Image (cartoon, rainbow, N blue to C red):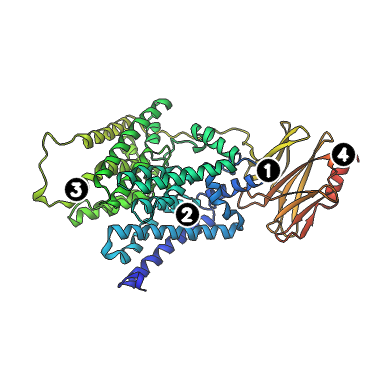
């Protein structure tokens, strides 16, 4: 129990309470009563499975319409989780998230409370666990907690720049940490982080040129993959400006200008501190990223909760009020509370205001809390005006928001749900695609040949008694398309053409509560003979039987 400190029973209680809170989030996600059953985790899984089947990484879309939005290197890092069965993947991911949360708490306790770090760490972890960002990370199955841990590891000077570089190649958000390493005087770590990020991206481009080109030249510049950035969950400066009703281009220009000014201010402060205040530097960086990022959803905001640990006053009551206020803002989504006028605007943008205040005011708060009352200098006319100019900018934004009530833009609804393409290609000179459409909460499989769409069926069942269930579409005696569902025991689907040749695919799971699906396309002159379902050992556990033989023979005229 040495690692728990002298007061190990209290530390053990804190870690146990943290695990219980995280487990409650996990169970909430399992029941599907939250945002769904780990929807983001299944976006990762579905996109990678689609990639393995020959589709583009960015062609995949989940049943709720969410696409894969990260650089291609993220798919490389996440690929091992696809090898696990869905239930095992969920448990492993949850345990890794809890471990990352605990590691973050230990790092923060090490620099913020070095004398009592063993006792402080579990209670910091518990404070983080009850916040909305941790709940969002666990219930969505998000990668953000690992990315934010990599940022903390780098800024708190626990490791070199390698973790930050890898995280920056997985998700662009950590790139903001590199200039902060330079500001701390850690040039080698900054260079290493940048080099690792560029190398990982470059190697991925070599092996995944199509997806890399699409991401860096199309998906990222367009920004369409991020969805509606005006929604209240996005607490970035861009989201706030869009909710005030500013024109799209005007909002973007104002966002870029504000982001540049705040970024310069934050880096100047970090350079002033050098490496003497790593905790404050981490918090300023975390707040800056929330403000200047195009999207700052709830799971991105985790490190803002550390503001509760900032000493704003030597008076215990004032300090308790500050910490309590921060925990309230980070634990409750106040934008769900309806309120008119200025109060409604403040509630709708409360975490943006917290982040903006932290970027502008932490240097002042830190200095004020550290100085005795009698030694504080009186303000004079020659004091630098930069902090006040930045605060004035924040007030101007607030006043602009108070001019109207918050507006929320929702994606337009169409009468026909979109088709999510899982795989596509060309056979015998004809273009084909395979995908699904969600209708009335059903997964309807679709085949399109030369732009002509045909539906195979909705929620096609498959279980241990029916290892493979399918439909066959033939086109002008030239193509045979076989698609359907398989049981969890089916590892591969094989299409036999003749005694010597066969084609195999790995089924894809696009929804956690539905069987995996597959699609095979061949030319009829190749004489497809039989369809087989194979288990992980390569043994046949099911066949297409007479149904497949009749479908091919009757339609082809042979």
Of labels 2 and 3, the one closer to you? 3
Secondary structure under tag 3 reads helix
Q: Which residue position is annotated with label 4?
A: 556
Q: Are marks 4 and 1 in contact (CB under 8 Å)?
A: no
Count neighbours of disc 1 (C-alpha within 10 A) and say few if under 14, some if 14 to 19, many if 20 or more. Answer: some
Q: Looking at the image, tell me whether mark 3 or mark 4 is earlier in sequence order.
A: 3
Image side of residue 149 versus residue 367, left or right: right
Count neighbours of disc 4 (C-alpha within 10 A) and say few if under 14, some if 14 to 19, many if 20 or more. Answer: some
Is 324 located above or below residue 289 in the figure?
below
Q: Position of residue 123 (x, y in %)?
A: 34, 62
Q: Looking at the image, tell me whether mark 4 or mark 1 is earlier in sequence order.
A: 1
Q: Position of residue 158 (x, y in %)?
A: 36, 56
Instruction: Let me know if residue 245 appears in the view.
Output: no
Of labels 1 and 2, the one closer to you? 2
Q: Residue reaching furthest left?
A: 374
Q: Residue at x 25, y 45 (%)?
A: 362
Say which of 511 and 365 sits in front.
365
How many labels, in total? 4
Q: Which residue position is annotated with label 1?
A: 444
Q: Which residue position is annotated with label 2?
A: 138
Q: Which residue position is annotated with label 3?
A: 367
Q: Residue at x 30, y 44 (%)?
A: 183
Q: Looking at the image, tell me whether mark 1 or mark 2 is earlier in sequence order.
A: 2
Q: Position of residue 536 (x, y in %)?
A: 70, 59
Q: Looking at the image, tell me whether mark 3 or mark 1 is earlier in sequence order.
A: 3
Q: Residue at x 56, y 57 (%)?
A: 89
């Amino acid at each position: 129990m040495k690692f728990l400190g002298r007061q190990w029973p209290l530390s053990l209680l804190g870690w146990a309470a943290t695990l219980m809170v995280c487990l409650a989030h996990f169970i909430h996600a399992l029941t599907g009563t939250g945002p769904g059953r780990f929807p983001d985790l299944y976006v990762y899984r579905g996109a990678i499975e689609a990639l393995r089947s020959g589709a583009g990484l960015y062609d995949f879309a989940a049943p709720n319409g969410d696409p894969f939005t990260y650089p291609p290197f993220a798919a490389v890092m996440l690929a091992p989780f696809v090898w696990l069965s869905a239930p095992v993947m969920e448990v492993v991911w949850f345990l890794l998230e809890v471990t990352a949360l605990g590691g973050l708490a230990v790092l923060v306790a090490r620099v913020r409370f070095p004398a009592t770090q063993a006792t402080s760490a579990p209670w910091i972890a518990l404070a983080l666990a009850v916040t909305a960002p941790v709940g969002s990370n666990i219930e969505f199955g998000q990668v953000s907690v690992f990315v934010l841990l990599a940022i903390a590891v780098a800024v708190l000077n626990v490791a070199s720049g390698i973790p930050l570089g890898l995280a920056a190649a997985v998700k662009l958000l950590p790139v903001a940490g590199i200039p902060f390493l330079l500001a701390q005087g850690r040039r080698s770590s900054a260079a290493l982080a940048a080099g690792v990020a560029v190398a990982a991206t470059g190697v991925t481009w070599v092996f995944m040129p199509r997806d890399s080109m699409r991401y860096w030249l199309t998906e990222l510049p367009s920004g369409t993959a991020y969805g509606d950035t005006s929604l209240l969950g996005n607490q970035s400066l861009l989201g706030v400006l869009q909710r005030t009703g500013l024109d799209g281009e005007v909002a973007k220009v104002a966002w870029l200008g504000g982001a540049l000014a705040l970024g310069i201010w934050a880096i100047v402060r970090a350079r002033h501190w050098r490496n003497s205040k790593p905790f404050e530097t981490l918090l300023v960086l975390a707040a800056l990223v929330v403000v200047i990022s195009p999207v700052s959803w709830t799971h991105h905001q985790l490190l803002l909760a550390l503001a509760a640990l900032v000493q704003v006053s030597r008076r215990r009551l004032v300090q308790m009020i500050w910490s309590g206020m921060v925990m309230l803002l980070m634990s409750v989504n106040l934008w769900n509370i309806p309120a008119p006028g200025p109060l409604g605007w403040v509630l709708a943008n409360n975490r943006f205001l917290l982040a903006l205040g932290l970027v502008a005011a932490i240097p002042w708060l830190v200095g004020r809390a550290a100085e005795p009352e009698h030694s504080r200098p009186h303000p004079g006319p020659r004091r630098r005006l930069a902090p006040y100019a930045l605060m004035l900018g924040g007030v101007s934004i607030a006043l602009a928001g108070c001019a109207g009530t918050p507006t929320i833009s929702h994606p337009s609804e169409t009468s026909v749900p979109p088709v999510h393409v899982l795989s596509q290609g060309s056979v015998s000179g004809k273009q084909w695609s395979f995908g699904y459409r969600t209708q009335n909460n059903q997964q309807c499989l679709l085949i399109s040949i030369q732009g002509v769409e045909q539906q195979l069926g909705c929620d096609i069942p498959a279980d241990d008694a029916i290892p493979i269930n399918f439909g066959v579409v033939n086109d002008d005696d030239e193509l045979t398309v076989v698609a359907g569902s398989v049981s969890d025991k089916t590892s591969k689907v094989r299409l036999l053409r003749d005694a010597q040749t066969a084609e195999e695919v790995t089924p894809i799971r696009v929804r956690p509560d539905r069987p995996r699906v597959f699609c095979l396309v061949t030319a009829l002159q190749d004489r497809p003979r039989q369809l087989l379902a194979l288990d992980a050992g390569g043994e046949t556990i099911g066949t297409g039987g007479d149904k497949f033989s009749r479908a091919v023979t009757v339609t082809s005229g042979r």
